[in-house]
Structures are given as C-alpha cells and as structure tokens.
C-alpha cells in the first residue's frame, strides 16, 4: 500500500496489491473519506477534498479504487461490493498519523460508483460513519435503460473476451460530452449481428462513463470552488483544468495501467451499479438527518425523478434523508464543486 501525503509517497504492504491513498488536512479536523467513481482515479474529487480542508479545516482521505490511478488490480477477484468494502477498510487502516475507526469516526462521501460502495460500507459498519453523503450514487440505475442486448453482452458473455476488451478500451478513449440532456432509452436489439452488438456495447459503456466528461457551454459559466488543484476561488481557465486532467488520466490509464480495462469490465458485471434495493433499504436504519443524497439536475445517467421514486422511499423517506439537487450533469462534483460543497455543509449543519 502507498500512503501519500501531499508530497512524498511511502510504501507499505497490502495483500491485494498496491493501493494509493492520499491524506491531508489538520490532524484535529473532522475526518472525511471520499470514494470516487468507475472510470477515473480519485482526481475527480480533489476540488471537494481541497475545499473541505480550506473551508472547514477537515482531515480528508482519498484513495484510488482497485485498477484505477496508481492502485493495482487484483484480477483474480470480482470487483463487487465485498472487494471495495474491504479496500475501504484497508485505506482507513493505512493512516500513519490518525485512527480512522471507532464510533462515529468519519464522514463518508461517495460519488457515482463510489456512492454505491459507500452505501454498502455505511450499512455494514454503521457505527463508523457519522454522516453519509451520496453524490449521484449508483445502485439503482434502471437496467432497462441500457437495453437488453447491452446487458446480455456483459452478463452472459455473449461477446468474446478479447473483442469486449478491445471495444471497452476504444470506448474509454473517446471523451463523452455531458450534454445536460437525459439519455434516451435504448431500443431493444432486433438482431445479434456484430454491428448491433458493437453498438449496444458502446451504449452500455457510454452509460457507465459520464463522469469522464468535457464541460459543455451550460457548465462553462459555473463558478468552481477551486482551480484544478483546489487552491483558488477565481473562475479562470485554470479553474477549469480539472476536467481536462481527468480525461488525460483516463488516456494514461489505458496506455499504462494493464489492469484498468479488466477492472472496469469486472465492475460492469459485479459492482453495485444496479439492483441494490436491499442495500439501500438498510439505509432506513440510519439516524434521521445522517444521510444526504445530492443529484445533478441535468444528470445524464442518474435521473433525479426516478431516484426520488425508487431510492428515497427505500432509504427512509424525506423525514430520514436530506435530498437535494444542484446544477449540472453527472460530473457536477467537478463542474459545480462550490454548489456541491454548500449542500454538503448544509447537510452537516455547518
């Protein structure tokens, strides 16, 4: 395991390979763990993390999920909720300076796939998590929105592994523009030709990847909470470089991380993206006011209206869960970081 403060990384051992963990902020601050999404490293959450340190003096921790960034991919294991819950525990235990466990030890923020992981972690270890914030969380994405052929391609191995790996890598190389429009429901496939299979596989990847976006005209006028490194309040061109850095890192992962594509494909099959009603229902046992769900009003993947119908009742209803919308699409933690932080602070009574 590699635990890195801003500056020099120090190596440590991990049974599942190397994990890159970042921790910084005042030692006496509130501890906040942030978990990122499916196709990127924890770079997507640096604006939020730096804002928490700068604005509220928090102690923050981020880490790269297995197969992303600088973390290894344990290729012999399915990338499911069990694996990632274990990885969260390993990241927490890696801190050389502070104990991140104990009653109410930390506040947990999960984004996209990280939100689905956070649901499982918070319900498995409720005594550790004093507050849970879910940003555009996965878990209840409706399978029918992806189309039957696309689902079958991954679930039933209808595409040869080598072809699927090539298709996945090709799709990941293409930046996906967050249009601010809802994704259309995919039509059912009428044939099983190679052309149809290739198309629907790309559609599935498009559904899974909207966090790797470029900013649209609608988003370009937003005020970021920071620049690419979270150190400035000015809305300058430099303040919009984080999204470009995310895109570059996806390209670097494809070129240099041998486990990235395999980890991504395993997540599509096994990670808590869909069908997680049982896990979400356990959120209702959390104390009222300790769970917040924040969605992008123009999210291309997580439909706020559908989640209000599907997720809110499972989690205990409006009396139990703080439910808020912010501007932007699925990449709102980057493109509307200031608004996202404001909602997080309000949820915590700050």
Image (cartoon, grey):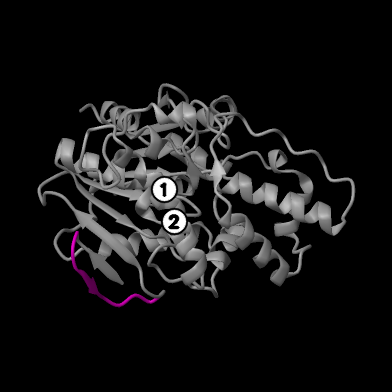
Q: Using the image as rendered, state which of residue 266 and residue 178 is in the foreground.
A: 178
Rounded to the nearest angstrom, the CA distance separating label 1 from label 2 is: 6 Å
Give the quarter of the figure containing the N terminus.
bottom left
Report the number of discs. Answer: 2
At 32% from the left edge and 29% from the top edge, which residue is drawn?
Answer: 223
* Above-or-below relation of 327 to 185: above
Q: Position of residue 239 (x, y in %)?
A: 30, 39
State yes or no: residue 7 in magenta.
Answer: yes
Give the quarter of the figure containing the C terminus.
top left
Q: Quadrant of residue 321?
A: top left
Q: What kind of secondary structure does the magenta stretch mostly adopt?
A: loop
Q: Is residue 18 left or right of residue 317?
A: left
Which residue is most to the top? 319
Residue assigned mark 1: 244
Can residue 27 be seen by looking at this rendering?
yes
Q: Position of residue 335 (x, y in %)?
A: 39, 35
Which residue is most to the right? 191
Q: Quadrant of residue 285?
A: top left
At 58% from the left edge and 40% from the top edge, which residue is drawn?
Answer: 140
Q: Quadrant of residue 62?
A: bottom left
Q: Position of residue 208 (x, y in %)?
A: 58, 48
Asked whether disc 1 touches disc 2, contact meaning CB atoms under 8 Å apart, the reply is: yes
* Above-or-below relation of 278 to 251: above
Say which element carries label 2. Answer: helix
State yes or no: residue 134 in magenta.
Answer: no
Q: Using the image as rendered, state which of residue 226 and residue 77 is in the foreground.
A: 226
Say which element carries label 1. Answer: helix
Q: Give the magenta part as a residue range.
A: 6-15
At 56% from the left edge and 32% from the top edge, which residue is drawn?
Answer: 179
Q: Position of residue 158 (x, y in %)?
A: 79, 62
Residue assigned mark 2: 248
* Above-or-below relation of 134 to 156: above
């Amino acid at each position: 395991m590699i635990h890195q403060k801003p500056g020099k990384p120090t190596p440590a051992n991990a049974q599942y390979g190397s994990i890159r963990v970042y921790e910084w902020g005042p030692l006496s601050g509130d501890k906040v763990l942030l978990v990122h999404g499916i196709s990127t490293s924890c770079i997507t959450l640096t604006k939020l993390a730096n804002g928490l340190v700068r604005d509220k003096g928090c102690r923050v921790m981020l880490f790269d999920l297995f197969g992303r960034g600088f973390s290894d991919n344990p290729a012999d294991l399915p990338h499911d909720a069990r694996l990632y819950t274990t990885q969260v525990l390993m990241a927490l235990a890696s801190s050389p300076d502070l104990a991140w466990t104990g009653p109410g030890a930390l506040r947990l923020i999960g984004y996209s796939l990280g939100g689905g992981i956070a649901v499982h972690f918070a319900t498995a270890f409720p005594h550790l998590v004093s507050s849970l914030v879910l940003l555009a969380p996965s878990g209840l994405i409706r399978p029918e929105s992806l189309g039957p052929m696309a689902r079958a391609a991954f679930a039933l191995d209808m595409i040869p592994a080598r072809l699927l790996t090539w298709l996945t890598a090709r799709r990941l190389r293409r930046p996906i523009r967050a249009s601010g429009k809802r994704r259309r429901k995919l039509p059912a496939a009428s044939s099983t030709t190679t052309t149809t299979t290739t198309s629907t596989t790309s559609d599935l990847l498009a559904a899974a990847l909207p966090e790797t976006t470029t900013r649209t005209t609608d988003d370009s006028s937003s005020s970021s909470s920071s620049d690419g490194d979270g150190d400035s309040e000015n809305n300058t061109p430099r303040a919009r470089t984080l999204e470009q850095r995310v895109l570059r890192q996806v390209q670097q992962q494809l070129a240099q991380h041998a486990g990235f594509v395999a980890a991504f494909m395993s997540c599509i099959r096994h990670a808590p993206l869909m069908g997680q009603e049982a896990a979400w229902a356990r959120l209702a046992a959390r104390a009222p006011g300790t769970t917040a769900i924040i969605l992008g009003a123009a999210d291309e993947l997580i439909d706020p209206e559908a989640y209000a119908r599907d997720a809110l009742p499972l989690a205990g209803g409006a009396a139990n869960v703080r439910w808020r919308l912010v501007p932007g699409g699925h990449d709102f933690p980057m493109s509307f970081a200031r608004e996202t932080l404001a909602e997080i602070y309000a949820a915590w009574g700050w």
